[in-house]
Structures are given as C-alpha cells and as structure tokens.
Image (spheres, helix red, strand yellow):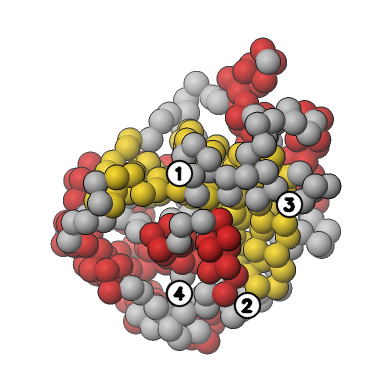
Amino acid sequence: MVWLFLSFLLSISAKDIRADTYLVNLDDAPEARWRNVIEGKLLQMKSFIKYIEDEVGSGEIMTAAALLKLAHLEESQKKELEGISKLSGFSYNTILVLNFMYEFYSSCTSIVVNTPDHHVLFGRNLDYDYAKYINKLVVEVDFIKNGKLAFKAVTMAGFIGILTGVKPNGFAISLNQRTMHDSAKFWESLSIVSGHTASAFAIRTAFEAKNTYQEAKNYLKNVPLIAGSYFTIGGVNENEGAVITRSRNYAADVWEMNEKRWFLVQTNYDHWLVHPKSDDRYHPAVDIIEKAGEGNVDKGVLFKVLGTPPVLEIDNSTIHSTVMNPYTGELDNWVRIYE
C-alpha cells in the first residue's frame, strides 16, 4: 500500500545511514574473528574509549574489570576479547568493561507482530545515553559457520555480545534493560552475582547453539544472568512471539502471543504495571499498530512506529532502528545520526 511505503520513508531521516557490514567466521580462531571489524572501526573505537575513560576514570575501569572477571564467559568468548584487545591496542580490562557496559545502561523498544502471510515481523529501537558516540560504532555482522550464514546481528565494534539479531528460518531476539523490580545498582549486581552470564552473551549463545524458537526461548528462560532484563523473541510461524521478563535466576513472566494477542510491545518496564508518563513509549507504539490493524502490519508500519517520538527518543538517544524477519532472515537496519 502506498501510504505504508510513504510512512516508511518519513520515518527515516535524510541523515540516517546504513551500517557497514562485516563477516565474522566462527570457524576461524576466536582471537582472529573480529579482525576486519576492529581494523575498519578502530578510529571510532579510540574516540569512544577515550570519552569513557575521561568520564569514568582508569581506576574505576580497573575496579569494574576485577569484578567482571567473576562473570561467566565461554572460553571462546574470552579468546575473542583477548583478540580484540591485541588488535585494537586497548587493555583486556578496558575491552571487558565495555562489553558489559551495554548490560546496564541501555533503554529500548522491541516489537513482535503477526504478518499478513502468517509469519512474524520483529522491530526494535536501541537507545543509549551516549548515542552520538556509539552510533559511529554500529556494524552489521554476518556470522558464518561451516561456510554458511548462521545468523545476523546489529552490534557495535569491540562488542562480542548480541543485543539485536536474527537466525534465518529460526528466530529473532532483542534485549531490553529491565529497570523495575531490580533495585540493586551496577556494582551491587556484580558483587552479588558470581559466575552468571551477561544477557547479551546469553543471546549470542542462543544464536550459536539453538536452532528453533522453542529451544532459544527455553534457554533464555533459564540461563543465570548478571542483571534482570527483557528478552523479546520471535519465531517463523504466526503467534510465535514472547517477552521473557527475567530476574537474575529465573523468569518472572513469559508474555506470549496467541490468537487474541497478535502483537507484543516491550520497553523497559514490566508489561503488567503502569508505564510512567515521563517515559511512555509503550502506548504510542501500540496506538500506531492498532490503527494499522491486524493483518496490515508490514515493514513500513514498523519503521513508522520506530521513527515516531517518543518511541524514537526525542533526546537523540536512539542509536539504530531495525526490522527483522525470522522466516527469511532479512535484517533492515538504519543508524540514527545526530549532528
């Protein structure tokens, strides 16, 4: 429909850009997998890390790294971080802290919705306080295994976890920070939890080790986490969509699509509670989807939702807007650019 196409065009600013795409071959040695990404984005990484070091201080980074080493990392993940450290010239401690930073300070909107052809579409905005620095690090990555595309992700150079990704003919997942009923602060979280994993690393494991929507959903329901979070997951078939509200050790709730609930919208608040008026992205998103109507939501509608304030953060903190199709594996991503 013409109006849907126009909605899509209007939701994308002339300043917004496509991210560079890189290949990460999982058959390569872990230390070498991210070479092309680091070489392509090294200047942007240096700028961002200098900003973080100036803001936080090297002493705080060292303290954080000592605690973060208690968290669970797969051996291959440790080697990937070591490789990024050597390739970039930054210390392992700095790279480690940056990889956990996204766990605690992001805000997002995630949407999963039935489509007219009886599959699902997945929409997501990633929002972050340092958007004008992080958006320069955004890359799209095609992960290759046994010579074939295994899954795709939108991520940041230097970061090995996944916040937004899709496995063709499998599932799509996005991560939202959970800001309610998880009152422990950043440092308290790390001191309390030993041996748990970061949510973004859990998503990476799901994409590498799980093949179906159900397998990935069950894994994300049960994996021990460092911090509470929301996993939004969509499969290939109609009504295969869920939001998993996670506490550190268990799933507090699993909110699923069904015959009467044809879409889900998740921001950074428990869906069964009242959303604060100061940060209500949920209801504006729901309004646009409901006005489009069941059976009429396509990529254009989702980009309209993602590009409409306040879903598109008016404080210029939205980093990228992404629409994914788990059935086909399509990933359509726009990086938001601010002057």
Q: Residues within 10 Å of mark 4 (few under 14, many from 20)?
A: many
| Marked residue nearer the N-terminal end (3 or 2) | 2
Q: Secondary structure at mark 4?
A: loop
Q: Residue 168: which numbered mark, if any?
A: 1
Q: Which mark is residue 86?
A: none
Write the residue at 25% across / 63% down: 80
Determine the CA span between mark 4 and mark 1: 25 Å
Q: Amino acid at mark 2?
A: Tyr
Front disc: 4 or 2: 2
Q: Amino acid at mark 3?
A: Met
**Which residue is the site of mark 2?**
250
Q: Position of residue 123 (x, y in %)?
A: 60, 41
Q: Position of residue 256 (x, y in %)?
A: 72, 57
In 3D space, how far apart are the residues under numbered discs 4 and 3 (Cα atoms)? 27 Å
Q: Which residue is mark 4?
A: 197
Q: Which residue is mark 3?
A: 257
**61, above or below 244, in the image:** below
Q: Compare marks 4 and 1 and give the one earlier in the sequence.
A: 1
Q: How dense is the environment of label 1, judged by Cα within 10 Å: few (below 14), some, or many (20 and up)?
A: many
Secondary structure at numbered mark 1: loop
Instruction: Tell me which amino acid carries mark 1.
Output: Pro
Circle nearer the N terminus (2, 1): 1
Q: Nearer the viewer, mark 3 or mark 2?
A: 3
Q: Nearer the viewer, residue 56 or 160?
A: 160
Alpha carbon of mark 1 to alpha carbon of mark 3: how far?
20 Å
Marker count (numbered): 4
Task: Please tell me whether mark 4 or mark 3 is closer to you in this view.
Answer: 3
Is 284 positioned to the left or the right of 171 in the image?
A: right
Name the amino acid type tagged 4. Answer: Thr
